[in-house]
Amino acid sequence: MQFASAVSKEMNAAEAGQALAGQIERVLQNGPIDLACLFLSSHYAEHAEELSSAVFDRLSPRVLLGCTGEGIIAGSEEIESAPAVSLWAAQLPGTSLTPWRLSGAQEGGDVGVMEWPDLHATSEPSTLLVFADPFSIPMDAVLLGMADHCQGSVAIGGMAGGGHDQGENRLLLNEGVYESGLIGVAISGDVSVRTVVSQGCRPIGERYVVTKAERNVIHELSGVLALDQLRQMFESLSSHDRNLAQNALHVGIVMDEQRNRFERGDFLVRNLIGADRSSGSLAIGDTLAEGQTVQFHVRDAQSASEDLNLMLAADRSRQTNPTLGALLFSCCGRGRGLFGRPHHDVTVVRERAGDIPVAGFFAQGEIGPVGGANFLHGYTASVALFSERHP
C-alpha cells in the first residue's frame, strides 16, 4: 500500500488541479490510484468542477471524493484563511471501495434520507468515510439510520465548511459536484482504518448517576437536584478550573457502563446549554436516560492538546503494523484560535503517527465513533489512520 499528499495555493482551478495531480504522480508511480480525497477552501467553490475534473481526468482514481472546508490541512500545514487545496491519494490493493451519496428528501415537511449504500457484497463491517453539507442533511438522523442500514460500520469524516448558507458548500464524488446532501465511500478489505476521536476535554469533579431526566433535561444527579450538584462540584474546584468551568463547561456521558473505571475516550461529550434556577434542572445538547453515568468536563487549549496526544499515543502503542497515511478533520473552533499557534493538530498527528502523508479540512462538525456508536461532534479532532490489515 502506498499513500501520498499534495497541496497547491494556485488560484487558477485547472492549474491547481494539474499541480496536485503532478505531485501525486511523482510519488505513486507504480499502479493505479484507488482512493483520492480532494479538499478545497471556499475560494475555489465556484470552480470546484473544473478543479476536480483536472484531478479525476489525469489520475483516474477508482473513487474521488472531497468537499470544501473552513480551512485546509495538507502535509504539515493547517491553512486556515488563505486559498488552498489539498489532495490525498492511496493505492489500496485488496480493498473494496463502495461510493455512495445521500440526498435530503422532503417527506411531509420533514427531511428524510434515501439512497443508502449497498454493502451486501462485503463480508465484514466497513469504514464509512463521510462528508456532508450541514445546511441540507439531518446528520443526527443519518447516523441513526446508519446503525440500521450499515450495521457494525464505523463512520469518520466531517461537515463541509466555508459556506454560510445552503448552496454555498461543495461536495465532490467522482465526476459529480453537489451543493447539498452527503457523499462517502465504504472501505473494507485488506486495509485497516483506525479512528481516533479527540473531543478535547478533561473530566472534573465526581461522577454522578442520572436519577431523574426527561429527553435532554437532567432533573436529578445521584438523588440531588442537578443544579445543586453542579454548584457543589464548582465549589470544590481549583481557581483555574473554576475559570474554565465558567466559560466552557460540558457534560460527559459514559458510553459503556460495564467498565470498572472511566478515562478519556469513554465519554461522549456534549454542551451544557442551560440551567433552570426554579426547578434546579440542567439541559444538555443530547438526550440521555435515567441510570446513565455522567461527569462534568472542561475544555481549553492545554486539555485539547493533551487529549489528542494521549489518544494518538495510546493508539500507536496497540499497533503492530505501521501507520501509512492519515486523514484529519478538525473543528473550525480549534486551530490558531484555540491553540494560539498554527498547525497544532496536524503536527501532533505526525509526531505520534509518524512522518506520513496527511490531509483533511476544518469542519463545521466532526463525525466519529465513541463507545461503539457513531456521532456528530463539535470542537473535536477526528482522525482516520490507515495501515495494512495483515502483517
Image (spheres, rainbow, N blue to C red):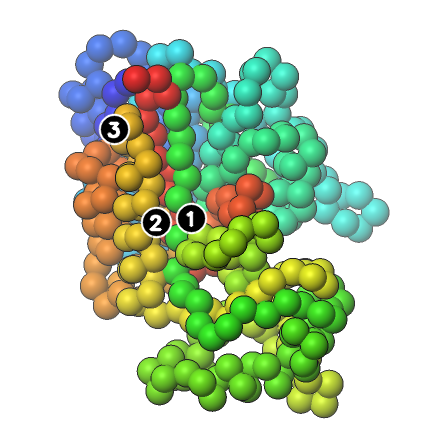
Residue underneath mark 2: 311
For label 3, the SS is loop
Q: Position of residue 155 (x, y in %)?
A: 51, 38
Kind of residue sitting beneath label 2: Met
Which amino acid type corresponds to the residue marked 1 in the rendered image?
Val
Q: Quadrant of residue 88?
A: top left
Give neighbour class at mark 3: few <14, some 14-19, many 20+ (Cα, 10 Å): some
Give residue 86's position: percent from left, percent from top: 28, 38
The earlier-in-sequence mark between 2 and 3 is: 2
> Which disc, if any, is residue 5?
none
Which residue in the protein does label 1 denote?
197
- Which residue sits at x=49%, y=30%? 127
- Front position among marks 3 and 1: 3
Q: What element carries label 2?
A: helix
Residue 145 location (% of width, % of height): 68, 38
> Is residue 363 found left or right of 121 in the rendered image?
left
Q: Which residue is drawn at 48% across and 84% down?
A: 234
Q: Sequence-wise, which precedes: disc 3 or disc 1?
A: 1
Using the image, tell me which numbered label, if any, was put on residue 322: 3
